[in-house]
Amino acid sequence: MKDEMIAQIDRASIFLKTLSGRSRLLLLCHLTDGEKSVGELAKLTGARDTAVSQQLALLRREGMVSARRAGQMIFYSLASAEARGMLESLHGLFCAEAPAEIAA
């Protein structure tokens, strides 16, 4: 039981570490709307294509995104149900509109 718990904690730690990078989190947020090319993601984030490609390679290694080739273009999309769930939770916590303040 203890070894299983440690293994799950290690898995969660890697998952959270991958999400914790600002640029990676931004890329993942943009991918919630559907697949996008490196060029599209670079334009959306203001980052260089090479920087976006490096971050996407890490996200792909961790299983959070998948790639689809169409000719010379590569399109990326969310591949992880866990990542999508976490992004939805983060959106609810930090991005959703705050309820109107109640007059005192």
Image: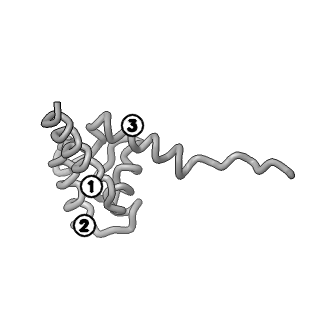
Q: Residues within 10 Å of mark 2 (few under 14, many from 20)?
A: few
Given residues 7 and 40, the one toward you in this image is 7
Colour mode of the rendering: one colour
Q: Which residue is mark 3?
A: 85
Residue located farthest toward the front when viewing the structure as drawn = 2
Given residues 76 and 6, the one toward you in this image is 6
Identify the image quadrant of residue 2.
Answer: top left
Residue 67: x %, y % from top left: 20, 43
Q: Is residue 36 left or right of residue 58?
A: right
Q: Report the amino acid beneath label 2.
A: Ala
Q: Secondary structure at mark 1?
A: helix
Identify the mark nearer the N-term, 2 or 1.
1
Given residues 48 and 27, the one toward you in this image is 27
Q: Is residue 95 left or right of residue 57?
A: right
Q: Report the amino acid beneath label 3.
A: Gly
Foreground label between 2 and 1: 1
Disc assigned to residue 17: 1
